[in-house]
Every structure is written in C-alpha cells, then in structure tokens.
Amino acid sequence: LLSPESSISVSAHNAVVRLAKAPGSTGLWDKFSFGPEPSALQERLFVSEENVDGFLGTAFCPSPCSQSALESQPLIEVLDVTEDRIQIRVE
C-alpha cells in the first residue's frame, strides 16, 4: 500500500477506506476483509469477471458438476463497473 494516497473518511452512518497500491504492485485485487477486530473479519470479493463467473458458477451448479452441465452454463462477461452500476453480458 502507498500510505500518503490512502485515506479514511468516517461519518455517522458510513465509513470509506481508500487504498492506493504502491508503484511496484501490479494486478487487480480479488478480495478484501473487514470487521471490528482481526478475529471477526468478513471477506468480500471485488467485482471482476473471474469473481462473477465463480459466483454464478456455484449458483448454477453448487455441487460437483458433470462435463455436460459445465458446458451448458452461460458465458458471463463483465462489461463495465462504476460506483453505482455494473453492466454484465450473459450469453
């Protein structure tokens, strides 16, 4: 993390933590953990094509699937992600 660019903003009903990657760090973050203390952290995934595929894959096929079931799953592509919406194409 890059300390000077990271920040925290807290209000009565909300908290925002802005994290900035250090210059040598590359790639997307897959997930983050949050909670009131280290022993009670909850994990959340960032919205990415891989995470959406994984989530919908378990939703459509929660137990080990046959090859034909895997081949019939829809193709899911994350087209756009903004603060207030996500655009996903399903074929």
Image (spheres, grey):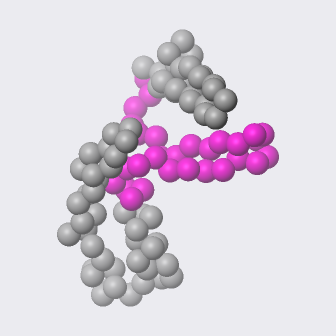
Residue 45 colored magenta?
yes
Q: Please tell me which residue is depicted at 70% across the width and 47% down the height of the picture.
A: 41
Q: Please tell me which residue is depicted at 27% across the width and 52% down the height of the picture.
A: 87
Residue 68 colored magenta?
no
Residue at the front extreme of this rendering: 12
Q: Please tell me which residue is depicted at 23% across the width and 60% down the height of the picture.
A: 89
In this rendered view, identify the residue nearer to me: 69 or 55: 55
- Residue 29, percent across and down? 46, 40
Residue at the top extreme of this rendering: 4
- Residue 26, percent across and down? 40, 32
In this rendered view, identify the residue nearer to me: 13 or 68: 13
**Total marks drawn?**
0
Q: Please tell me which residue is depicted at 41% across the width and 49% down the height of the picture.
A: 47
Residue 27 placement: quadrant: top left
Residue 1 placement: quadrant: top right
For this view, does 18 lie left or right of residue 41?
Answer: left
Identify whether 65 is placed above or below 44.
below
Q: Which residues are magenta?
A: 24-52
Q: Quadrant of the C terminus?
A: bottom left
Identify whether 16 is placed above or below 29.
above
- Residue 15, percent across and down? 61, 31
- Residue 30, percent across and down? 47, 46
Residue 74 placement: quadrant: bottom left
For this view, does 38 lie left or right of residue 30?
Answer: right
